[in-house]
Amino acid sequence: DIQMTQSPSSLSASVGDRVTITCRASQTISTYLNWYQQKPGKAPKLLIYAASNLQSGVPSRFSGSASGTDFTLTISSLQPEDFATYHCQQTFGIPRTFGQGTKVEIK
Amino acid sequence: EVQLVESGGGLMQPGGSLKLSCAGSGFTVVTTYMSWVRQAPGKGLEWVSTIYSGGNTYFADSVKGRFAMSRDNSKNTLYLQMNSLRVDDTAVYYCAREPPYTSAWDYWGQGTQVTVSS
């Protein structure tokens, strides 16, 4: 199985900060890497697909990048509505594994 | 508009069975990959199962042999039959769509709570 190691598990940041979350795959997954945002009591929402493609309707302050088996989600200027938990997921193989999640909290 | 609506969750005793439903609208369930994922209280997302458009199904080791996926084309609905339920199956269960042109889960159901307790 492909393991996804996401870091950090949590972070505190202020409105306007630049935030970076990383995910490392245990083997090559090409760019089959997706990022989701989840708020309490809600289903996850797709932000980025195929490592760097912005899902329709998602603000442009969200971006994704890839370097080998390392993937990064960046929020360029954190907004109040961005405080949530973020998950990475690989869809290169079965099982469709997720990272452990990163909770972004208000500093 | 694409929508997924889940139902069927509830409280069951260990060893019992439940069948979850995921009704699709705005697209055809059998033409895309569909998956189930679950989230235990305070935990991350755990993939449960996937059905390919051709009908092949895949399951997590933790549910293999106990859970089954099926589809009803006439109702445009996906199902998850859960048998021999265990306490550690307690979670919110979500269905999600994975169209091949993105290989990402672009639409999710609202989630349904499954609680297994004696």
Image (spheres, coloured by chain):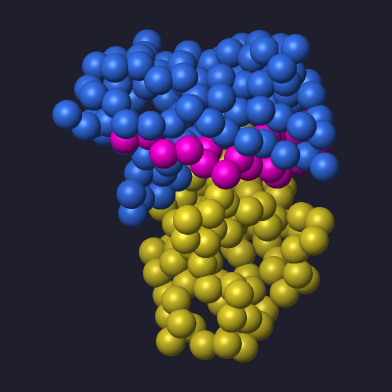
Q: Quadrant of residue B79?
A: top right
Q: Is residue A29 visible?
A: no
Q: Quadrant of residue B23?
A: top right
**Is residue A94 shown left or right of residue A5?**
right
Q: Quadrant of residue B73?
A: top right
Give the answer, above or below, for where A77 lies relative to A48: below
Q: Residue at x 56, y 77 (%)?
A: A19
x, y (%) of residue A82?
59, 73
Quarter of the image with the N terminus of chain A is top left
Q: Is residue B11 left or right of residue A30?
A: left
Q: Which residues are magenta?
A: B94-115
Q: Residue at x 57, y 44 (%)?
A: B110
Q: Residue furthest left?
A: B118
- Residue B1 can be seen, yes or no: yes
B108 inside magenta stretch: yes
**Frontmost residue, A53 versus A70:** A53
Q: Is residue B76 left or right of residue B61?
A: right
Q: Is residue A55 left or right of residue B12?
A: right
Residue A67 percent across, percent down from the top left: 63, 57
Tell me the blue chain. B
Residue drawn at the location 33% of the way across and 54% of the way down:
B42
- The chain in yellow: A
Residue B57 in the image: x percent, y percent?
56, 15
Q: Residue at x 64, y 14 (%)?
A: B71
The one of A76 and B79 positioned closer to us in this rendering: B79
Query: Is-magenta flag for residue A35?
Result: no
